[in-house]
């Protein structure tokens, strides 16, 4: 289905000719990271990582947009977006957004932002859009990805009286694949902004996601898996004590080996859960932006709350695994299987807070800082049916990228197909603080450096809370229009959350082409 966009304002705008924009890039990607870091993050496709910790790949991305106004009031946008194409030199796979190309292409047809718009009014005070859009909900912390839907945008500053208000509303289907999946789970959002001064803007955010067909299944399945594995480890002594003394050593050894292997197989995607969900998840928040000629300060706070009915059970592979492992101890198999099955309502409560600053310095230097918090949870741990809360902040398709390694794998980086996530390793939340410096010494050259320290909001199973330290270095050199060369290096030193792990890195070098009217 091609997206359409309609824009409605007060008077027609002048007609325009076709405008064309082309962006293309190609790069070499090299990564060597501790597997624990990748497995701790949600096992979802992302723009630059898979669960392969050590790999080399050739990557490319293409974006083409055509824009035209055939009539004064009507605008057309046609977009092509390949997503991230990748040839994995480790195993020879050809991927698109982290999935096999032959599977991905029929789902997306590489369709980018495509829309129609209808405008009336010289100032365009009211705008309606319908189609495949690229909305940014909740400052990008809730959703920053493609979605089918409609938007309405009103900017009252464009009226003759210049009221200092703006508002934007969305009705969206976050899943943009050409399949039936996710099409009955809509997202509604409203943003209202107040321009108090030329330098100060305050915005209120609200959003409501209606899960009417397993939309929240990925996050709850992952939370349940981590919680159940943790609870099974904690309850192993109680299970073993039910056996006769002569059988307890064998039962303990079998149980420990099984739980350890089950965790490894779950991380690898071999074992999993069948999850069915329905419910709702709402968001309320406040955002402020203060900007002068040299200083920009932005703050964002979001609170999420929802209730979801979930039906969770080990999938066929998991059940077959338990049957094989405990063929000689069926009693233990039955008890473990029962502890891996659950049904009932789950309460979702989460918090998100972000503060960023940017300060222009002499010598074409810019200093930046960020402070980030996401609430976390250790998973659905409790056997008490009255205690069914999951306190990690849950987002639909966020784009939160203060650093390139740590935040990448836990995000739904594939903007072509948003997937609900908790944008933090293991859903354990994040406390992060970072500083950055960039400079443009020449018109054709810019370099940057970012350093960050990261902690979890809740401890890991080993008691550790320090994720680690990350350092990002980048440079961009415009050789000659329209070409630019880029190089990015990321280093990650793991902390006690992951244990004693070697230094990890990502190295990306490539070229970019930009053509536009």
Image: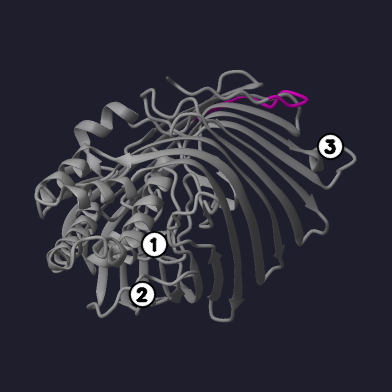
Question: Which numbered disc flags the more N-terminal residue, 2 or 3?
Answer: 3
Res 63 visible: yes
Question: Which numbered disc flags the more N-terminal residue, 2 or 1?
Answer: 1
User: Measured from the top left, where is residue 337 in percent x and y?
Assistant: 27, 46
- Tell me the distance, in whole angstroms, between the alpha carbons under discs 2 and 3: 54 Å
* Disc 1 versus disc 3: nearer the observer: 1
User: Measured from the top left, where is residue 69 in percent x and y?
Assistant: 57, 24
Is 174 drawn above or below residue 98 in the view shown?
above
Q: Which residue is drawn at 16% across and 47% down?
A: 330
Q: Is mark 2 on a helix, strand or loop?
A: loop
Residue 425 shows which numbered tag?
1
Residue 497 shows which numbered tag?
2
Q: Residue 356 versus residue 495: which sits nearer the camera?
A: 495
Q: Residue 386 versus residue 460: which sits nearer the camera?
A: 386
Q: To which quarter of the image does residue 319 belong?
A: top left
- Tell me the distance, in whole angstroms, between the alpha carbons under discs 2 and 1: 10 Å
Q: Is mark 3 on a helix, strand or loop?
A: loop
Q: Which residue is drawn at 69% across and 38% down?
A: 168
Is 16 magenta? The answer is yes
């Amino acid at each position: 289905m091609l997206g359409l966009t309609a824009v409605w304002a007060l008077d027609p705008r002048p007609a325009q000719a076709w405008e064309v924009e082309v962006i293309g890039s190609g790069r070499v990607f090299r990564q060597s990271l501790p597997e624990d870091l990748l497995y701790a993050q949600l096992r979802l496709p992302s723009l630059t990582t898979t669960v392969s910790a050590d790999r080399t790949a050739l990557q490319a991305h293409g974006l083409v947009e055509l824009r035209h106004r055939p009539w004064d009031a009507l605008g057309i946008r046609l977009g092509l977006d390949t997503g991230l194409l990748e040839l994995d030199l480790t195993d020879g796979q050809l991927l698109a957004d982290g999935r096999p190309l032959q599977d991905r292409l029929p789902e997306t047809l590489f369709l980018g932002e495509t829309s129609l718009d209808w405008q009336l009014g010289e100032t365009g005070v009211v705008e309606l859009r319908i189609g495949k859009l690229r909305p940014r909900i909740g400052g990008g912390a809730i959703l920053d990805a493609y979605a089918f839907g409609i938007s309405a945008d009103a900017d009252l500053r464009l009226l003759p009286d210049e009221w200092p208000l703006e508002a934007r509303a969305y009705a969206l289907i976050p899943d943009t694949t050409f399949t039936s999946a996710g099409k009955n789970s809509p997202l509604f959002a409203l943003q209202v902004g107040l321009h108090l001064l030329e330098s100060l803007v305050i915005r209120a955010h609200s959003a409501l996601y209606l899960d009417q067909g397993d939309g929240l299944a990925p996050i709850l399945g992952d939370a349940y898996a981590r919680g159940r594995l943790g609870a099974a480890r904690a309850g192993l002594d109680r299970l073993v004590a039910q056996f006769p003394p002569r059988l307890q050593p064998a039962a303990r050894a079998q149980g420990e080996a099984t739980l350890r292997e089950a965790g490894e197989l779950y991380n690898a995607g071999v074992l999993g859960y069948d999850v069915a969900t329905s419910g709702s998840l709402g968001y309320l928040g406040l955002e402020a932006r203060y900007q002068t000629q040299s200083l920009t300060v932005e703050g964002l706070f979001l609170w999420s709350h929802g209730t979801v009915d979930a039906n969770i059970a080990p999938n066929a592979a998991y059940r077959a695994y338990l049957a094989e492992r405990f063929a000689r101890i069926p009693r233990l198999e039955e008890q473990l299987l029962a502890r891996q099955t659950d049904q009932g309502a789950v309460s979702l409560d989460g918090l998100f807070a972000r503060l960023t600053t940017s300060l222009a310095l002499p010598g074409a230097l810019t200093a930046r800082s960020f402070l980030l918090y996401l609430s976390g949870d250790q998973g659905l741990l409790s056997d008490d049916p009255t205690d069914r809360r999951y306190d990690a902040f849950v987002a639909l398709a966020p784009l939160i990228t203060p650093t390139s390694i740590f935040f990448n794998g836990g995000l739904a980086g594939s903007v072509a197909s948003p997937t609900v996530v908790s944008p933090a390793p293991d859903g354990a939340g994040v406390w992060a603080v970072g500083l950055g410096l960039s400079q443009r010494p020449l018109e054709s050259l810019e370099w940057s450096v970012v350093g960050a320290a990261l902690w979890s909001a809740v401890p890991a199973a080993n008691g550790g809370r320090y994720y680690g330290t990350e350092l990002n270095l980048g440079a961009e050199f415009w050789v000659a229009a329209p070409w630019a060369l880029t190089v990015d290096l990321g280093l990650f030193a793991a902390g006690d959350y992951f244990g004693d792990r070697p230094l990890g890195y990502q190295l990306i070098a490539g070229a970019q082409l930009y053509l536009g009217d």
